[in-house]
Image (cartoon, coloured by chain):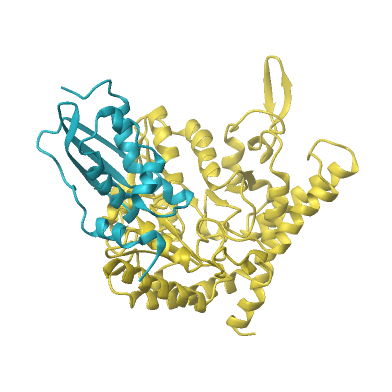
């Protein structure tokens, strides 16, 4: 089956793509980096849980609770296989990539970071991988450093040797940038961190949905991502960690499920991963994420990646034709499936409003990456981000609408 | 090219903003921004005998926020502090003459928010 035929086929799996907007236009959804759409199978899996076996997990001895627990834990196993984690016990369910990073900051960070220590992050991080470290820096007194980027929007590898020192305890970096599209050379970065004995945390929110990821091959100490950007529901995320690190870390929040024994004088923690999952978890959402993983595996992550590269190459070439359009970040070969851009004389909000009239959904703003926009010298940008169901025809509608935006603002 | 949101007057104010820049020794200055979109507006006023005699704005943002700021600066001339406090959402929408959705409404109301946040802190115009 050709790529185009396959896409046509896959589009049928997403009910929302049949949506006609109030102005009569068909939906063209290019805001996948913010959140992806959900296939029928994910919606059905969550619906099925609520209709047939809604119950709390890890507690009841009744049939429904056993079924719910089995489905919940099966989802953990699916996720573990999906990113090639050695064991499902190394998959901690969180509310999203943001909470996953905060979990590391608040537990591992508190246990290991002291005045004189350094945490290195990069100039292309999402606020989710900046702010937790700023908060912890305030409390713990370590030093936060930023690895610079080049004018092309790549991490400046030449600057790393002076930034990574024996003081560096943790190097946190994004796998695929949500603005530049840059895919970072993870193995090189991990090797550089290892050479000074630093741990690494990788923000995989924009990589796991779009390409095959193997956390063992990457040698990640911590790896964070969200469910809702990979066909799964919101309110669900994952933190992967190396076993020995997770075992040694103190708990995150206190409450039910995370304890083994509670007395009036103290408590003993449950084993990993439950130690980090206080309270009743997002059960339907975990089951939904499991269904999303099944769906992506059935499509094939190699196919998803190849399809997005094709769309991105096409969009890059077509958008470059638009006069006054500046694409942020590297060329099409070095990027994932998104293109953030500015258009001379038209503010990103106005671009997004005019595209919306053509049925095209894009994001406008600083995409939770204000320091990066400062570095690039722009206040804001518009961003088109692609997924497995997008087609070149949709890109053509985008480009036509960009021409129209320019016409409106230059006439 | 017709587009409701971007009617000619708004585009004209966006491309050729009136009252954009800074005043010499303003009697009143206030600045704010919208953290979600990054739009920024500074408002400066000069007051004589209890009414605004000069006004200017500075900042950056989308066509709606910038055009609204420019129009609003023209509107406030000759107004008293109480009259400025009485300017409301309807006033702005009438001034713009467009239908506007809830998201872009924030853009249209940012200049008013900046003006009023400053004005509400005042019992009377600063000396």
Q: Residue furthest top?
A: A265
Coordinates of residue A242 in the picture (x, y in percent): 58, 47
Q: Is residue A397 above or below residue A128?
A: below
Residue lying at 57% horizontally and 63% vertically, measured from the top left: A22
Q: Is residue A115 above or below residue A26?
A: above
Q: Nearer the viewer, residue A209 or A107?
A: A209
Q: Is residue A396 left or right of residue A303?
A: left
Q: Is residue A174 visible?
A: yes
In the figure, the shade used to draw chain A is: yellow
- Horizontally, residue A45 falls left or right of residue B49, namely right
| Residue at x-position 39% and y-position 36% | A134
- The quadrant in which the C terminus of chain B is found is top left
Quadrant assignment for the N terminus of chain B: bottom left
Looking at the image, how many numbered discs can be counted on the residues? 0
Position in image of residue A144 (x %, y %) = 35, 39
Q: Is A196 placed left or right of A209 in the picture?
A: left
Q: Residue A115 in the image: x percent, y percent?
A: 36, 29
The vertical placement of B67 against A359, above or below, is above
Based on the displayed image, in which of its 4 quarters is residue A324 positioned?
bottom left
Direction bottom: furthest residue: A2
Viewer-proximal residue, A402 or A46? A402
Residue at x-position 67% and y-position 39% = A272
Q: At x 53% / y 61%, what residue is drawn?
A: A32
Task: Using the rendered image of the protein, determine whether residue B34 is visible from the camera's viewpoint.
Answer: no
Chain in cyan colour = B
Name the quadrant containing residue A380: bottom left
**Residue A338: image location, x then y, percent:** 45, 65
């Amino acid at each position: 089956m050709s790529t185009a035929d396959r896409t046509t086929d896959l589009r049928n799996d997403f009910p929302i793509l049949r949506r006609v907007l109030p102005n009569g236009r068909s939906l063209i959804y290019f805001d996948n980096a913010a959140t992806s759409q959900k296939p029928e199978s994910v919606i059905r899996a969550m619906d099925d849980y609520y209709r047939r076996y809604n119950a709390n997990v890890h507690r009841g001895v009744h049939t429904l609770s056993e079924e719910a627990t089995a489905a919940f834990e099966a989802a953990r196993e699916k996720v573990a296989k999906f990113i090639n984690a050695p064991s499902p016990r190394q998959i901690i369910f969180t509310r999203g990539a943001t909470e996953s990073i905060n979990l590391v900051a608040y537990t591992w960070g508190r246990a290991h970071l002291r005045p004189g220590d350094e945490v290195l992050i990069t100039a292309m991080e999402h606020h989710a991988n900046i702010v937790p470290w700023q908060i912890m820096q305030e409390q713990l007194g370590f030093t936060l450093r930023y690895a610079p980027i080049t004018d092309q929007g790549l991490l400046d590898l030449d600057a790393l040797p002076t930034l990574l020192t024996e003081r560096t305890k943790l190097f946190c970096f994004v796998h695929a940038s949500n603005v530049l599209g840059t895919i970072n050379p993870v193995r090189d970065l991990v090797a550089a961190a290892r050479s000074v004995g630093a741990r690494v945390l990788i923000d995989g929110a924009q990589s796991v949905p779009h390409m095959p990821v193997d956390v063992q091959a990457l040698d990640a100490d911590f790896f964070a991502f969200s469910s809702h950007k990979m066909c799964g529901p919101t309110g669900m995320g994952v933190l992967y960690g190396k076993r020995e690190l997770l075992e040694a870390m103190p708990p995150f929040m206190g409450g039910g499920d995370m304890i083994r024994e509670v007395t009036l004088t103290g408590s003993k923690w449950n084993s990993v991963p439950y130690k980090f999952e206080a309270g009743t978890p997002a059960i339907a959402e975990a089951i939904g994420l499991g269904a999303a993983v099944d769906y992506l595996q059935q499509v094939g992550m190699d196919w998803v990646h190849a399809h997005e590269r094709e769309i991105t190459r096409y969009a890059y070439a077509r958008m470059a034709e638009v006069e006054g359009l500046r694409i942020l970040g590297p060329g099409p070969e070095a990027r994932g499936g998104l293109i953030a851009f500015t258009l001379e004389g038209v503010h990103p909000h106005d671009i997004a409003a005019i595209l919306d009239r053509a049925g095209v959904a894009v994001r406008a703003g600083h995409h939770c990456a204000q320091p990066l926009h400062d570095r690039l010298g722009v206040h804001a940008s518009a961003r088109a981000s692609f997924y497995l169901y997008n087609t070149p025809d949709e890109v053509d509608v985008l480009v036509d609408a960009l021409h129209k935006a320019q016409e409106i603002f230059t006439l | 090219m017709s587009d409701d949101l971007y009617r000619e007057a708004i585009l004209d104010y966006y491309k050729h903003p009136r009252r954009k820049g800074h005043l010499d020794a303003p009697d009143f200055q206030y600045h704010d921004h919208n953290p979600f979109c990054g739009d920024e507006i500074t408002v400066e006023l000069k007051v004589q005998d209890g009414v605004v005699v000069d006004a200017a704005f500075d900042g950056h943002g989308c066509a709606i926020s910038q055009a609204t700021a420019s129009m609003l600066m023209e509107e406030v001339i000759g107004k008293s502090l109480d009259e400025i406090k009485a300017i409301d959402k309807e006033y702005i929408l009438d001034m713009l003459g467009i239908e506007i959705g809830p998201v872009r409404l924030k853009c249209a109301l940012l200049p008013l928010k900046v003006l009023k946040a400053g004005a509400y802190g005042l019992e009377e115009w600063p000396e």
